[in-house]
């Protein structure tokens, strides 16, 4: 998935088990527009120890066998053949022509209705088997692109070179590049369904989307009248036996304005105050971990220094990406000569206070104070006061936890970027919620804060929520089928970040959706691997569910 993870969906850490007795979540009003590929987290995926633990089994240390040479011994054969074929097609985000042509050719070769939509997505329709025309239509969906990474020094052009995949024990791995099992495994499985000569099912549609890992333009650009099915099974999750049933919607809330400056006080020395050494993290997936927020910590320091020490603020900046929790923030300040020593002691004491407050989560937090060349101007004193108060009051962090999925963050805000210097103010928040109306609420909370300060906010980059629905019929069918096939209950999770399903639900609010997939580790990294035995289980589940889909 997009993930940051795209596919951070694999982060079972973040997953929350849906309790059997939980009530259906309120249906949110999905926003209509696009979403950024949001799971590209600020931090590397925590690669499971899966690869390490699975390779040295009874057969001893495994060696790499080229995937092509291993195809005869891998099951399901058709899926792995398809997966190999996909590895031969360069498909980094933004380079979609070759994989699109491959899939169009594939669909036409099977004699199936095949089309490319305005967004560049491929849709292939497989008609119902005889006597099954009245079954509900199912859309099977995966994304065509991959995050293409290569090791330093590796001669690899992601736009022209195939992925060199190998089988190592129970895993498919790559050599010095990402593998592209995210989401090549999803494509390969859907192709196998389309090819199947034995599957008896109702009408199926295969939707292959473009650029999930970058702009999500495929899901965002999908038209609301293209799909005929009423059930969507997304094949972009990363943990076999764990179903994903929800994702957050989100939007950016921007405050942009000029502001008044005055000449810097001639008789005061200037200093850079910097809060640094924080852990940061993804603004959705890690927002509930209590990590320090560099901008908020700096603003708190400034608020306590204006009155006692006569501090004047020239500029403040923090945050590098709106979907990351800021790790550093700094301010250029002026202080009267007579107050420098007292201010310095205040900074040391403040540092000790916040180091104590955040000792468990921010061991490397520090506050630095350094003399610098004085800038020519400072903020107008009235603006300085209003800015500090507005940043102090701006909502930050978790606002509400989900009732439908215990442990899931329902609504949050991240004050992602603050850049106030040279007479220009830019503040950007990233608000998220799995409930559409709650997203409007947090957005309004931020707007009210800045209205009090005399500024207006603008909302951009909206993307829709996929609100968890504990009474989803496809969830019930999947759970029952999983139990029948494998004798155990699957896990259920939702993520506090954007997924393609959210965007699709914005266009198809009544679509009953679920996301599944084989077990992947290390997606988007050079350690990406696909756990071979999990593929057969997902296919068995998929085939059985497709045969059990009820009538309309
Ligand atoms: Zn993916």
Image (cartoon, rainbow, N blue to C red):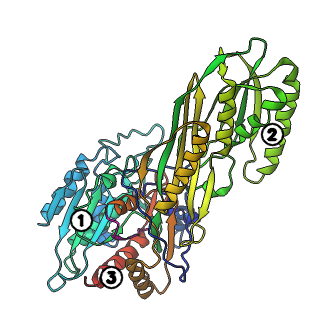
Question: In this rendering, would 123 be left or right of 519?
Answer: left
Residue segment shown in magenta: 508-519
Q: Quadrant of the C terminus?
A: bottom left
State the predominant SS element of the stretch in magenta: loop
Q: Would you name the residue on which mark 3 appears?
A: 544
Q: Contact (CB < 8 A) between labels 2 and 3?
A: no
- 312 shown above or below 169: above
Q: Would you name the residue on which mark 2 appears?
A: 351
Residue placed farthest to the left in the image?
111
Where residue 21 sits in the image (x, y, percent)?
Answer: 54, 83
* Residue plotted at (81% across, 31% down): 307
SS assignment at label 1: loop
- Ligand 1's image quarter is bottom left
- 185 shown above or below 132: above
- Of residue 285 and residue 154, the one placed in the foreground of this image is 285
SS assignment at label 2: helix
Res 66 seen here: no
- 188 shown above or below 412: below
Where residue 348 sits in the image (x, y, percent)?
Answer: 84, 35
């Amino acid at each position: 998935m997009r993930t940051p993870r795209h596919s951070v969906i694999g982060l079972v850490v973040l997953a929350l088990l849906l309790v059997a007795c939980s009530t259906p979540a309120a249906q949110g009003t999905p926003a209509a527009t696009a979403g950024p590929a949001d799971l590209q987290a600020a931090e590397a995926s925590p690669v499971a120890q899966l690869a390490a633990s699975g390779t040295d089994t009874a057969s001893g240390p495994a060696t790499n066998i080229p995937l092509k040479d291993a195809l005869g011994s891998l099951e399901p054969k058709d899926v792995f053949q398809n997966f190999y074929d996909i590895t031969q097609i360069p498909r980094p985000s933004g380079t979609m022509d070759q994989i699109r042509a491959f899939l169009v050719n594939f669909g036409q070769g099977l004699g199936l209705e095949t089309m490319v939509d305005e967004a560049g997505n491929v849709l292939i329709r497989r008609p119902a088997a005889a006597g099954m025309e009245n079954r509900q239509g199912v859309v099977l969906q995966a994304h065509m692109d991959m995050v293409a990474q290569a090791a330093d020094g590796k001669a690899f052009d992601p736009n022209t070179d195939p992925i060199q995949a190998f089988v190592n024990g129970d895993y498919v791995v790559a050599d010095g590049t990402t593998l592209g099992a995210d989401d090549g495994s999803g494509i390969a499985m859907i192709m196998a369904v389309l090819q199947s000569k034995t599957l008896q099912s109702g009408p199926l549609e295969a939707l292959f989307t473009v650029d999930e890992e970058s702009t999500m333009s495929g899901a965002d650009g999908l038209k609301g009248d293209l799909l005929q099915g009423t059930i969507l099974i997304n094949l972009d999750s990363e943990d076999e036996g764990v179903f994903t049933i929800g994702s957050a919607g989100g939007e950016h809330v921007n405050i942009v304005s000029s502001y008044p400056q005055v000449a810097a006080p001639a008789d005061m020395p200037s200093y850079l105050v910097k809060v640094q050494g924080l852990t940061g993290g993804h603004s959705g997936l890690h927002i509930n971990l209590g990590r320090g927020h560099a901008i908020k910590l700096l603003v708190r320091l400034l608020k306590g220094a204006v009155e006692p020490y006569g501090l004047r603020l020239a500029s403040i900046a923090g945050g590098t990406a709106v979907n990351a929790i800021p790790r550093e923030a700094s301010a250029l300040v002026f202080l009267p000569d007579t107050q420098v020593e007292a201010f310095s002691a205040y900074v040391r004491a403040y540092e000790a206070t916040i180091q104590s407050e955040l000792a468990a989560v921010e061991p490397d937090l520090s506050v630095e104070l350094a003399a610098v060349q004085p800038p020519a101007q400072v903020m107008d004193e009235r603006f300085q006061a209003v800015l500090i108060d507005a940043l102090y009051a701006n909502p930050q962090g978790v606002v509400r936890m989900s009732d439908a999925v215990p442990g899931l963050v329902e609504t949050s805000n991240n004050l992602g970027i603050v850049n106030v210097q040279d007479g220009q103010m830019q503040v950007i928040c990233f608000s998220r919620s799995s409930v559409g109306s709650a997203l409007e609420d947090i957005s309004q909370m931020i707007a009210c804060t800045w209205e009090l300060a005399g500024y207006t906010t603008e909302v951009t980059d909206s993307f829709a929520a996929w609100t968890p629905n504990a009474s989803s019929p496809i969830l019930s069918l999947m759970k029952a089928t999983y139990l029948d096939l494998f004798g155990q209950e699957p896990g259920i999770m939702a993520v506090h970040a954007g997924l393609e399903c959210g965007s699709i639900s914005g266009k198809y609010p009544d679509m009953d959706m679920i996301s599944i997939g084989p077990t992947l580790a290390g997606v988007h990294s050079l350690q990406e691997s696909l756990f071979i035995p999990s593929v057969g289980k997902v296919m068995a589940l998929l085939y059985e569910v497709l045969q059990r889909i009820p009538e309309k």
